[in-house]
Image (cartoon, rainbow, N blue to C red):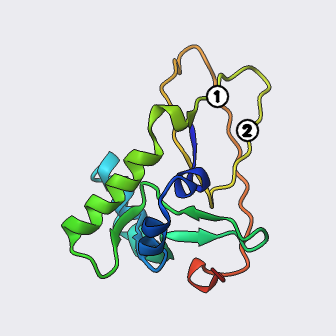
Amino acid sequence: MFVSQRAAYDRLSPERKAELHPLIAIHDYVYSRSKVAPDAVSPELAASLPPVRQRLVRTNPTTGARNLFLGSHVREIEGMSEAAGRALIDELTEAAIQPEHVYVHAWQPGDVVLWDNRCLLHAGSGYDADRHRRYMRQTRVSGTCSTLEEVG
């Protein structure tokens, strides 16, 4: 399942965009994995993956297009109370993932799907692992800078 965070941003009012533009989100791998399985992250791995400050609104360095930068790793919004930050994250995520905005890929043998993690939410759906083999490859491309340094 895939959701465009660029389209989610575009659906916001100009006033809401202005409110969100300066905000910094704290992305935390340990936070997101702990929601799925509390003991999933060893202390050694946690120490190697500290939380990272990222802009809540990203600007594509090539096109200038803006998008929300949400995902399961977003733990909080810098400068907001935990409750207020969590409410904002949940509100934006819920609006983005409404069924009419979700693309569900109907997988066929040989399919290849590529996406840009900078501007897309993605999630898997259940499948019969006893009947179907899932083969995945991941490629990462290094960006030119931190989102905090992006012009925007």
Q: Is residue 152 left or right of residue 52?
A: right
**27 w.r.t. 100: above or below:** below
Can residue 48 be spotted in the picture? no
x 79%, y 71%: residue: 62
x 67%, y 81%: residue: 145
Badge 2 amino acid: Val
Please give the label number shown on residue 105. Answer: 1
Q: Position of residue 116 (x, y in %)?
A: 69, 54
Picture quarter with the C terminus: bottom right
Q: Which residue is at the far top?
A: 131
Can residue 63 be spotted in the picture? yes
Q: Position of residue 103 (x, y in %)?
A: 60, 33
Q: Is residue 116 left or right of residue 41?
A: right
Between the residue at mark 1 and the residue at mark 2, the CA separation in whole angstroms equals: 9 Å
Tag 2, which secondary structure? loop
Labelled pair 1, 2 in contact (Cβ < 8 Å)? yes
Q: Position of residue 32 (x, y in %)?
A: 37, 56
Picture quarter with the N terminus: top right
Please give the label number shown on residue 113. Answer: 2
**94 w.r.t. 81: above or below:** above
Q: Which sits in the foreground, 117 or 79? A: 79
Tag 1, which secondary structure? loop
x 48%, y 70%: residue: 56
